[in-house]
Image (spheres, helix red, strand yellow):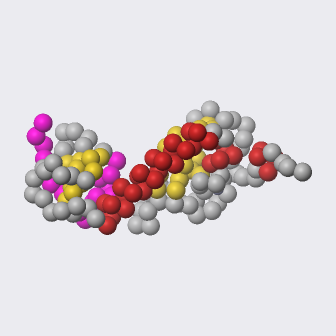
Amino acid sequence: MGKTLTEKYQGNIPLDTKYHVHDIAIKDKDDTFGFSTCENCGHIISNIFIIKGENEKTYGVGSECVIPLTNNGLELQEWKRLLARKKKFIKYIATEAKTVIWSDKHDTAWAYSVDVNSWQHYFRYRFSRKEYQDLIKLKNIKTIVDNRD
Ligand SMILES: [Zn+2]
């Protein structure tokens, strides 16, 4: 006899509210911040879905627990795509990026696969400086500040 998802569910996070995915994060092995275990089942996770309930409480859960907790396949597909893109970018920064140029005035940065000394049109990624500046510093990538408008 088949049980419903909710009947099979056994976890630490209460089901008395609806959850939706609020953000995603990736736990890098060199990372010192962020979640590292699923708050629902306790497993060590590297792909973290940050879910938020109607009561505004947030939890970090893994890719298995997020399914019964959010119960929205379409929304989840979008977040998984975003997660995959983010992972690809982080891997690029960690293994291939040679130079990053960023602006202090704008929340923008450009990553290059080659050594450059000024902004060039052949950047590989354009991204949010604020979001990734810790990672850039951690990886010791050559960084140039370019503050022109
Ligand atoms: Zn879990």
Picture coordinates of residue 3 (x, y %)? 84, 48
Q: Which residues are magenta?
A: 130-149
Picture coordinates of residue 30 (x, y %)? 40, 66
**Residue 24 visible at all:** no
Q: In the image, is residue 134 part of the stretch drawn in magenta?
A: yes
Picture coordinates of residue 10 (x, y %)? 76, 53
Q: Nearer the viewer, residue 115 or 35?
A: 115
Q: In the image, is residue 10 part of the stretch drawn in magenta?
A: no
Q: Quadrant of residue 138?
A: bottom left
Which residue lies most toward the front here?
A: 122
Q: Is residue 78 above or below residue 132?
A: above
Q: Residue at x 80, y 45 (%)?
A: 4
Q: Is residue 148 above or below residue 136?
A: above
Q: Residue at x 31, y 60 (%)?
A: 93
**Residue 115 visible at all:** yes
Q: Residue at x 22, y 61 (%)?
A: 113
Residue 38 falls left or right of residue 120: right
Q: Is residue 145 above or below residue 113?
A: above
